[in-house]
Amino acid sequence: MISLYNTLTRKIEEFKPLDPPNVKMYACGPTVYDYQHIGHMRRYIGDDILVRVLTANGYNVKHVMNITDVGHLTSDADTGEDKMEKGAKKLGLSVWDVAKKFEKQFFDSMEKLNIKMPDVIMHATDYIKQQIELVQILEEKGFTYKADDGIYFDTSKLSDYGKLTGQNREELKAGARIEMVEDKKNATDFALWKFSPDSASRRQMEWESPWGVGFPGWHIECSAMSMTEFGPTLDIHSGGIDHIAIHHTNEIAQSEAASGKEFVKYWVHHGFLSVGGEKMSKSLGNFYTVEDIMKNGLDPMSLRYLYLQTHYRQPMNFTWEALEGAQNALNRLRGEISGADEGNQGCAEFEQKFMDALNDDLNAPNGLAVVWDLLRSNYPKPAKLNSLYKMDEVLGLNLKQVQAKKPVEIPLEIQNMVKEREELRKQKRFHLADQLRNKIKKLGFDIRDTDDGETEIRKI
């Protein structure tokens, strides 16, 4: 049995798909106007763990992700510039080239973090027709009105608008942004289709529609694409907690108004990542990508290990010290399996404990604890390795690939530096020894001090 925290009901529930063993899962993908940073990637690793856990339990998951390449405005109040247009001006590229550039960076980061590719990837610009058709359905059912800058959804027509947040309409109005589009009836109303500006400042991305030339609102794309792929009701919809109050609330409103059916059974939301206790920001100089992790001489998989140490719903604070600790832990884990042969039988007791942990609302930290308990147990090493590989099918740390690598020849320069470090440690000059270890790490090697006083050298 798998249990998941459902944002809609605000409680942990047993997962029961609509059509077992098949699972329909839709994930909000990136807006490809800028680099995807390590905060974004934490969320996608969370989705990856969810898919792997479902698969390990025998479910057939169809994982669909969108790429937002149009319509995401800089303000949630339906004002401001389209982020794609903004990115194009900043970089001096066309919006289409901006989308290609940052989509590639996103998928490169996924590959480095061993995140499985979704089964279906849908670009918003490929589904303009379906988005227009969905707005037309809403118009026919009386849920829309025309304002000066576009076609809007009238949230007052839905008695349960905002149910995902647990707030009533008045509370949502009180929390809405003060900025209001002219002719907007309610503070919570949102744009379904935006009109293009005058010809003097025409957009690069715009389409003909029954209401005039323009572009779709951000929210309508996810409803149109998910229902095109899956029909009116999904099993799981995932995203960051920042999507709850506006984006996902509006997805529910327009989807259920159009179909008359429940849109999503289980809403799964991931917690924020801060850096050094602050929000990640380029202006603060704490904006990091997976590429930055590698430039600092660390394995991207250490970032995955770091994420696994915190429950996906909990906020997480990133520091370089914590990442180095995760790298050391991952290297110890790799060291435990180094040179071992895989057995024909595993350790069923630990495998069960591991799955019990992950099936309990994807509790990866508890799953990691089981991994280390297994390695400390008295089972034969081949049996441990057999079970560890099964666990890693969920954790995704690529342990089998690391084990399969041939021994690396250690350069003489590195060997001499290791000897020098050992002498410094004997002299209790630990600060200088640590500095030398960091230098060795930047050259692509890591050192592990074993319990019996030996020193092991590994290629990172």
Image: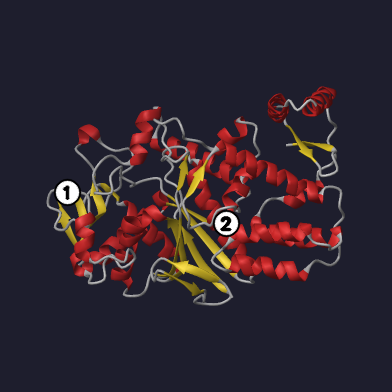
Residue 163, given in percent of the width and then of the height, sits at: 31, 68
Residue 421, given in percent of the width and then of the height, sits at: 78, 26
State how far apart marks 1 and 2 are (Cα): 38 Å
User: Does residue 67 appear anywhere in the picture?
Assistant: yes
58 up-or-down from 96: above or below: below
User: Does residue 220 appear anywhere in the picture?
Assistant: no
Residue 208, given in percent of the width and then of the height, sits at: 27, 49
Instruction: Tell me the quarter of the picture where residue 83 sits.
Output: top left
Residue 153, given in percent of the width and then of the height, sits at: 22, 60
Q: Quadrant of the N terminus?
A: bottom right
Mark 2, secondary structure of its residue: helix
The residue lying toward the viewer, choosing from 71 and 29, is 29
The residue lying toward the viewer, choosing from 2 and 278, is 278
8 up-or-down from 424: above or below: below
Would you name the residue on which mark 2 appears?
48
Q: Please name the amino acid that badge 2 sits on.
A: Asp
Q: Alpha-carbon neighbours of circle 2 within 10 Å: few (<14), some, or many (≥20)?
A: many
Mark 1, secondary structure of its residue: loop
Q: Earlier in the sequence, mark 1 or mark 2?
A: 2
Q: Please name the amino acid that badge 1 sits on.
A: Met
Q: Quadrant of the C terminus?
A: top right
The residue lying toward the viewer, choosing from 207 and 268, is 268
Residue at image x 81%, y 23%? 420
The residue lying toward the viewer, choosing from 7 and 147, is 7
Residue at image x 76%, y 52%? 400
Would you name the residue on which mark 1 appears?
180
Contact, mark 1 vs mark 2 (Cβ under 8 Å): no
Question: How many marks can you see?
Answer: 2
Residue at image x 24%, y 56%? 190
Q: Alpha-carbon neighbours of circle 1 within 10 Å: few (<14), some, or many (≥20)?
A: some
Q: Which mark is residue 197?
A: none
